[in-house]
Image (spheres, rainbow, N blue to C red):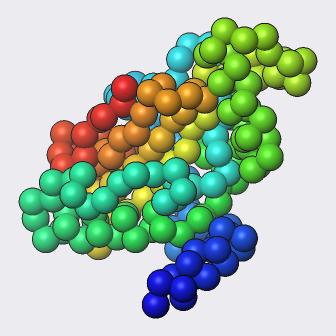
Amino acid sequence: MIVAFVIAALATAQNPPRRVPIPADLAREAYELYSAIYAAPHTCDPFEPDEGIVVSSEAVAESRADVSIDDLHPRSADEQWMARNLIDRIKIPYVWDSKSNFGRRIRVLGEKEEEAVTSCLARRSANRKEDTECLPYAKVIYVRSFSVPSFNRDHTRALIFTNRSCGRIQCGGQEFSEYRKIGSRWIRQDGFGDCVFY
């Protein structure tokens, strides 16, 4: 059994899960939700005034998220369903494109460019000289990544997990947060998802 486990682990490392598009039934609402969150002033993770905004094309997945349902405190059956659904979605390497409208220009990073930006941020935070390749990212503060939202059954509530990194340990952070749709707007709620950015 141990040998089989090791073989499976090696196979996964050599053949990482293929990135897949966000399911069509989720895509429209997902882009609408994130556009609403960052266009409004009440997010707990606002963009800095002069920030060059870059977003990973990979949705938050297990590879970059150390999370479990124990990090949430769902009270109702509806919230328990949303929490389990979000954790399940984090296991799938979904990919974003640039359909969200954050009210400002954003740059969606492919895998190789994300590695390059992260390296530039790490050099900057360590006060090391940056290469000329880092010049296009001079205003970048964080590489941000977003989970695919978990909606409740009537799609009036949404739970998300977001991550931001500035290239080194203990710099950036993660959060769960809950939003409720009121009219045509998504409004952040003080619920079972709370800001935990550091």
Residue, far left: 75
Give percent across and percent down for residue 76. 10, 65
Front residue of this view, candidates 22 and 197 = 197
Compared to 44, does 7 lie above or below? below
45 sits to left or right of 47: left
8 sits to left or right of 79: right
Quarter assignment of residue 14:
bottom right
Compared to 119, does 111 lie above or below? below
Count of numbered tags: 0
Q: Is residue 102 visible?
A: no
Front residue of this view, candidates 58 and 6 = 6
Quarter assignment of residue 116:
top right
Q: Residue at x 73, y 25 (%)?
A: 120
98 sits to left or right of 89: right
95 sits to left or right of 145: right
Q: Residue at x 19, y 67 (%)?
A: 80
Front residue of this view, candidates 99 and 191 = 191
